[in-house]
Amino acid sequence: MKGIRILFRSISDSLTNIGRNLSLSIASISCISITLILVAVSIILSQNVNSFTNSIEKDVTIVVFVDREATKEEIDVVEAKINLLDNVESIKFQSKAETKKQMQKESDVFNTIMSEYTDETNPLQDTYLVKVKDINLIGETAKEIKTFDKVAVVKYGEGMVEELVKIFDIVKKITYIVVIALVVVTAFLISNTIKITITNRKREIEIMRLVGASNSYIKLPFFFEGLWLGFIGSIIPIFACCYGYLYLYNRLGGQLFTAIIKLVRPDALVFNLVISVLLVGVIVGAFGSYRAVRRYLKI
């Protein structure tokens, strides 16, 4: 019971201290808000970059051309063998008649030429469109499919795909590093801001020590004070970035420059953004306050 009373007393004292030292509290909250806005923006950029790279990777397809002389049974065998591969996520059969129709829609020239083709004279080939689970293994999967009987040609943009994967990996790593670096910088700035706030109240802490207050009794209110400052300071970045992103998303029609670069839907991004910014603000605020009391005032 005594521990619970001390806990609630510490929470009450922390709120009282924020109001009593309003100017310093506002300075801390302002610093937290400014730095967390940078963190929020970096999270938004990171989410969109990762979404774009993942969507491009998912669109990469292995095109398997079947021999023209292959029978229906032999084509089915090819499909069965492809389905047995571990890295195959999905497979879709496209007949030469379907390919013909698609090409006719794409160009008037193709339409004029191919309209004369019959099922017997159609020079195109039946194909399988194969999606892979791991794009890093697409080359190995394509080579294995090429060894199957009645498979004429296998194409997936070899060379270019591997380079694209390397670039995407580098971009993802850079975005992660930027986010982590900003969180570390934010932690440093918030910690130092709260340290200044607590240092200005050193006399208050010394009086508490003189009347016999224990270390934990002194530290707890400051811990919760830092937690509240972090929580309040994260509210502004959350609202600013969430509404700002929603406005930008609607204004741009959900895409950036071109339909290929689609922005992450706000409902899919907002939850992660709110949780991330709130956790960073609260944890760093509480830790910064605790660290300042323990190390800089040497309680």
Image (cartoon, grey):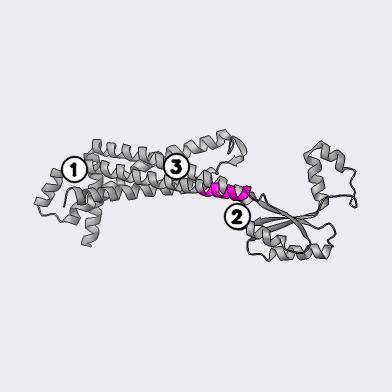
Answer yes or no: do the residues labelled 1 and 3 have beta carbons within 8 Å?
Answer: no
Q: Quadrant of the N terminus?
A: bottom left
Q: Is residue 39 magenta?
A: no
Where disc 1 sits, the SS reads: helix
Of the numbered discs 1 and 3, the one sitting upstream in the chain is 3
User: Badge 2: how crowded within 10 Å, few (<14), some, or many (20+)?
Assistant: some
Q: Which residues are magenta?
A: 158-169
What predominant SS class does the magenta segment belong to? helix
Can I make out residue 12 in this image?
Answer: no
Q: Which residue is mark 1?
A: 199
Q: Tag 3: residue type? A: Ser
Query: Does 188 sit left or right of 262 as displayed?
Result: left
User: How many numbered dots are placed on residues in this image?
Assistant: 3
Of the numbered discs 2 and 1, the one sitting upstream in the chain is 2
Query: Which mark is drawn over residue 135?
Result: 2
Q: Position of residue 82 (x, y in %)?
A: 70, 63
Camera-side residue of 94 and 37: 94
Of the numbered discs 2 and 3, the one sitting upstream in the chain is 3
Q: Position of residue 264 (x, y in %)?
A: 55, 44
Q: Is residue 161 magenta?
A: yes
- Looking at the rendered image, the disc whose residue lies closer to the viewer, 2 or 1, is 2
- Looking at the rendered image, the disc whose residue lies closer to the viewer, 2 or 3, is 2
Q: Which residue is mark 3?
A: 42
User: What is the spatial separation of the Cα atoms under label 1 and label 3, in whole angstroms?
Assistant: 32 Å
